[in-house]
Image (cartoon, grey):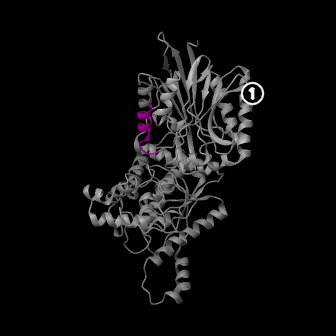
Amino acid sequence: MTDRLTLALAQVNPHVGDLAGNAALIRATRAEAAKTGVDLVVFGELTLCGYPPEDLVLRPQFLADCRALLEELAAETADGGSALLVGVPLDQGGYPCNCVALLDGGKIAAIRVKHDLPNYGVFDEKRVFAPGPIPGPILFRGVKLGVPICEDMWTPDVCEALAEMGAEILIVPNGSPFEDGKADERLSLAVARIGETALPLVYVNQVGGQDEMVFDGASFAVDADCKTVLTLPAFQSALGRLTLTRGADGRIALSSDQPPAPALGREEALYTAMVVALRDYVNKNRFPGVILGLSGGIDSALAAAIAVDGLGAGRVTAVMMPSPYTSQESLDDAAGVAMRLGITLHSVTIGPAMAAFGEMLAPLTQGRAADTTEENIQSRARGVTLMALSNKLGAMVLSTGNKSEMAVGYATLYGDMCGGYAVLKDLYKTDVFAVSRWRNHTAPAGALGPMIGSETLVMPETVITKPPTAELKPNQTDQDTLPPYDVLDAILTGIIEDQKSRAELVAAGFDEALVTRVWGMLDRAEYKRRQAAPGVKLTRRSFGRERRYPITNGYRGG
């Protein structure tokens, strides 16, 4: 019976669909881990194909290609080196299944299938995968490994069954996307499973951006006494070394000689999530860079800082598009942001476009007072300008709208909503302020943008302190149309994230008329959100997959 076993926790960033690239990543990680004589390298959920593969797994050839590469990797373990525990989709009895495979001794030594398929929020695995039976332990070099896959850990059934079948440790491969506050929830669930099974638990999560999700890694190992033994950094690829030792009582204890990675504060986690999500969206989709409108306001300044930190200043182009209503302060602030970030700032006035549209529409609009029509024309002229430059330069247009605006429809279709990616889409305006203040005084790990010195700010303080405005008419501010953002965001959080009723919000102290007004704005803007660019999930209920309301909707209750 084995008295000592070493594991490597492989926290890596796979690319969905790039099977050959992911296999190369697995090989390179195994080679790195082998330098320290590791017995088993553990990867996250579906690492060989990337997570989530969605309808790719409905293609028989895709599953066949995954199987062929898995067999190649298995054959390479005949060298007597580290074994591999790899997540992979496989055809099991004519159905695609979410599996993990143990590769050892030159063969596929064991396969286990995910039992509990999530079908909520961003997950719809029941649509594409068949569930497996409750898995039994895998015997590996004298140790019985219980391998619940991701969601299998979120409820007690699978882990309890594994313990009853003799598992000595729980090793959990994950594809768990980031959301605000989720790290504490994961650890609490792990501790709960340990309490139910009296088994140590190893949690291996992937990192990197995939469309509207970003994975934060933050893998960890917790001993049977609920002591955290190892933590890996958030949002970074990493390799963790863990030693399993069988004690005199026959039970497995965990130890590691690696120092624990520090946890990120809330603002740093939100900011880093956006940086990683945008970086991977641009790089994995092979865009040369991004282009965005830099208005002198806080949203575009924050989006520009995120882009520079993720891609480098040389891959970020900014365009100031002044109208007759653009203030000198906005011009100065936009220039100040560009200068501090080291990015090129072009200026294209939209005055001629406004005049041209006014002349074009005059025969049909004469005698009608100016209203939001003229305001939206300005926004759409800017959108056309950015898309034209995107076509010429090849850079992706980066949309700069935030969640508060998207919620209540304070955004213009085919105007400021246009773009390939909306990096602030799930960030409330109050958090835009908080994250901007944080970045103005702190440089996150791995940032490609400016470091912070005693005299250096990423954006002028006036960008953060001045009243937000769209500047589509004289003396305009956001609060002409919207309630103060702290009040608005509190109501929106109650409706969207907490799913509270109007009565509950009023009971919590919010004005009834204001709650009803915000509720109506949220409902009416659904058609806009359906046409919005994708953006990274940061909260419990992001717009899109996690909050799906009908556009044509006659229900007014709540």
Which image quarter is the C terminus in? bottom left
Residue 180 within the magenta-colored segment of the rendering: yes
Q: Quadrant of residue 476?
A: bottom left
Quadrant for the N terminus, please: top right
- The secondary element bearing badge 1 is classed as helix
Where residue 344 sits in the image (x, y, percent)?
56, 58
Residue at far top of view: 248
Using the image, determine if residue 341 lies above or below residue 78.
below
Reply above or below: 382 against 249: below
What is the total number of numbered labels drawn onto the structure image?
Answer: 1
Write down the residue under mark 1: 75
Viewer-nearest residue: 267 or 551: 551
Give the amino acid at mark 1.
Answer: Ala
Q: Position of residue 327 (x, y in %)?
A: 42, 69
Question: In front: 466, or 387?
Answer: 387
**Residue 479 can be seen, yes or no:** yes
Residue 263 location, quadrant: top left
The percent position of residue 39, horizontal first and vertical second, equals 62, 21
Residue drawn where x is 66% and y is 42% of the image:
95
Circle 1 packing at 10 Å, graded few (<14), some (14-19), many (20+), is: some
Q: Which is the main secondary structure of the residues drawn in magenta?
A: helix
Of the pair 26 and 62, the residue shown nearer to us: 62
At a point 50% along the width and 24% down the height, the residue shown is 163
In-image side of 4 versus 160 (left or right):
right
Which of these two is toward me, 139 or 39?
A: 139
Residue at figure coordinates x 52%, y 47% from the top left: 119
Q: For the magenta stretch, what is the residue range?
A: 179-190
Residue 309 visible in the snapshot: no
In the rendered view, would you say 522 is above or below 80?
below
Question: Magenta stretch containing residue 63, yes or no?
Answer: no
Residue 444 on image: x %, y %: 48, 42
